[in-house]
Image (cartoon, helix red, strand yellow):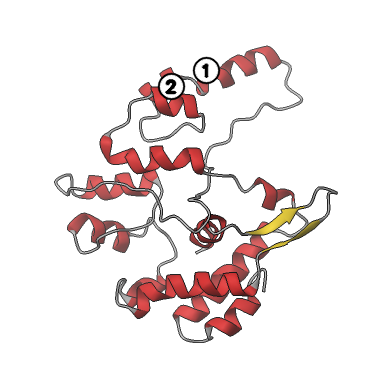
Amino acid sequence: MWFLVNYFIWSHGYTFMKQNGDGTWQLGVDAEAIAEAMRYFNSFFEEGISPRSLIAVDSWGDPEILHGLAKGDFAMGFMPPQSFRAAMDANPQAPLASAQVPAGRVTRRTHLGGRTLAINKNTKHLKESWELLKWMCSEHVFETYYRQQFSAQKTLLEKVSYASEYEGYVKLIPQAQTFYEYIVSPVRVQTMWSLTNREFAAVYSGQKSVERASKGSPGG
């Protein structure tokens, strides 16, 4: 839930942590906004959109989701490109396609991450390392070797030709953001992650009301 909750609050103009101009930090979301997210995602189970058996699934690469999508039992699913590719491979005849995540009141936002290229500050071969890094980010590499990956560079997204079923990812990446602000904030990401998953799961399972769980979440 961590990723999906962030997509939701970001798209509605909130964030768990934000830094002020003077360098201090503060919460960028409140219990009311978290409660709205809880009601939205819980409605998938309450209204019968998603089977309750999926409450126990904690990975968008879970076989139940991938095969359900591949067989046509599920109409849609939230997942990264690699999981989407696995669903297509499970049933090449299935007419699967990707689309952008739903927009919020302010924007449409997802997260950017998965690959990190860095140069060790202690390297004795700085020039060569920089040349390798530039090559790894080149159009040639994405066209030839990274066919199931997407560049974070808008210019490359426009140049590299992707299969039509990946259109949703290509359109959404330019609107994505990283978790950098969370990482440099004084609150551990793992703490926010764990609290978010715990409180949302409590709502889905009926252990807590939305009002109570939202106050136990980051921002509550």
Q: Is residue 89 left or right of residue 42?
A: left
Considering only vertical position in the picture, is 129 above or below 10? above
Q: Position of residue 178 (x, y in %)?
A: 59, 45
Label 2 residue SS? helix
Q: Which mark is residue 135?
A: 1
Identity of the residue drawn at 29% across and 58% down:
76
Q: Which mark is residue 40?
A: none
Q: Name the residue at 52% across, 72% down.
A: 36
Q: Which quadrant holds residue 61?
A: bottom left
Q: Is residue 125 visible?
A: no
- Mark 1 Cα-neighbour bin, 10 Å: few <14, some 14–19, many ≥20: few
Q: Give the number of the disc on residue 141.
A: 2
Instruction: Determine whether the residue tagged by mark 1 lies in a helix, strand or loop.
Output: helix
| Mark with earlier residue (2, 1) | 1
Front-most of residues 120 and 88:
88
Disc 2 and disc 1 in contact, CB within 8 angstroms? yes
Residue at left 45%, top 25%?
A: 156
Q: Position of residue 163 (x, y in %)?
A: 28, 33
- The quadrant of the image that shows the C terminus is bottom right
Task: Identify which amino acid the numbered label 1 is placed on.
Answer: Trp
Residue ranking furthest to the left: 93
- Name the residue at 24% across, 60% down: 75
Which image quadrant is residue 25 in?
bottom right
Vertical relation: 152 (above or below) 128: below
Q: Residues within 10 Å of mark 2 (few under 14, many from 20)?
A: few
Q: Amino acid at mark 2?
A: Val
x and y percentages locating residue 187 in the rendered image? 74, 60
- Depicted 123 relative to depicted 178: above or below: above
Q: Is residue 184 left or right of residue 193?
A: right
As measured in the structure, the alpha-carbon distance from the residue carrying label 2 to the one carrying label 1 is: 7 Å
